[in-house]
Amino acid sequence: MRVLVIKTSSLGDVIHTLPALTDASRALPGIRFDWVVEEGFAEIPAWHPAVDRVIPVALRRWRKQPLRTLLGGEWGAFTRRVGQGHYDAVIDAQGLLKSAALTRHARGPAHGLDRRSAREPLASLFYRHRHRVAWGRHAVERVRELFARALGYAIPSTPCDYGLDAGRLGARDADAPCPAPYLVFLHGTTWPTKHWPEAYWRRLLELAAAAGWEVRLPWGDDMEEARARRLAAGLDAVRVLPRLNLAGVAAELAGARACVAVDTGLGHLAAAFGVPALSLFGPTNPAFTGAWGPDQRHLASDFPCAPCLRKGCGYRPTEADRAHFDLEREQPLCFTRLPPERVWQEFQARLLAGGRDAPSPAGIQREAI
């Protein structure tokens, strides 16, 4: 059986789809997948052993230059690739008009969410088969149910398994020394309101360094690199990573003892590789989009307006807020409910306590393998 998956973006959404492929592979031995995904995330599907062909799409880039896309041949090349093979099922796992429209270029019956289940109800008009999947659950579980209904197997009740093959990231040299245990702090995210205050990150790094940990800071653009270098300034135990592609960041995450993250796609990637993580939520709701899997812990703000699900903060500070907080350095204020001392205490107690490779206060201990 051959299936085409359409899940183009974002990073977290792409990762949320992986457990459904693992479910289907167990329920239907021999099933194989092709996957249409945004070009920036094209590395990820190839890490799953059930995926044969990854078909990059560039909707984000193409919509900025539609005429150039059509005349330059990129759109035509994409539609030809999608239409090359015949599929037993084409599953739009995104439920948006932009993804639903892509099903028209594939050869095979299209499946997707019905109008009451999709984020954009009109998307259901593009599907031959429409499936009801209830709201109110985590995105991973909703996608698992969609695949089960589309492909005709029982909805799994087992814990999710992302099925990623870490070996596809590039094997470590067997003769190379085993690295000391380290942490990764994922400080970058998209919405301005999802950023934990920089002063809090700096204090958390100081606490981790004082406990003997090496901490690694990845970054994805110039602004994130500049922040990482400010955070690491003067702290010998903190390492700003070089510019890495997605596979390089994944390899760093896969080797980490644990990580702290804001609400970011890389936090979902850590979960997919089974890395224990503590994720911090201010304006967003971890019940629906938090990192999902074993050893994933969430700290959510209980500020009066959280979660607001807004990219811009509309909260007006009170006189009490002005008296207690630095309104320049502690923004958004919902994160004042998650100060660095509380985060470090939770991180140690829930994810680092009793770890076999935890460093001593005197320094990081190297462990032989």
Image: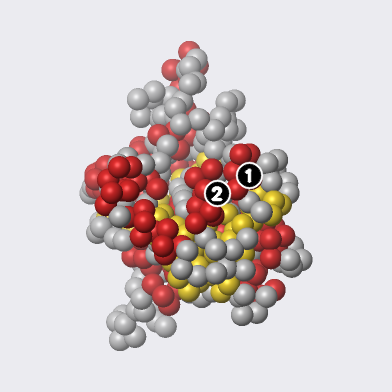
User: Which residue is depicted at the point 63% across and 51% down?
Assistant: 127
- Does the image show residue 243? yes
Q: Are marks 1 and 2 in contact (CB under 8 Å)?
A: yes
Name the element at disc 1.
Answer: helix
Quarter location, residue 256: bottom left
Q: Is residue 12 above or below residue 178?
A: above
Quarter location, residue 152: bottom right
- Give the spatial CA distance, label 1 vs label 2: 8 Å
Q: Is residue 85 above or below residue 119?
A: below
Q: Quadrant of the N terminus?
A: bottom right
Q: Nearer the viewer, residue 61 or 78?
A: 78
Residue 131: % across, % down: 71, 52
Residue 360: % across, % down: 41, 65
Image position of 12 (left or right of 90)? left
Residue 151: % across, % down: 69, 65
Q: Amino acid at mark 1?
A: Leu
Q: Amino acid at mark 2?
A: Ala
Q: Nearer the viewer, residue 1 or 307?
A: 1
Q: Estimate how packed mark 1 is, as few (under 14), some (14 to 19) or many (20 or more) residues with alpha carbons within 10 Å.
A: some
- Does the image show residue 287? no
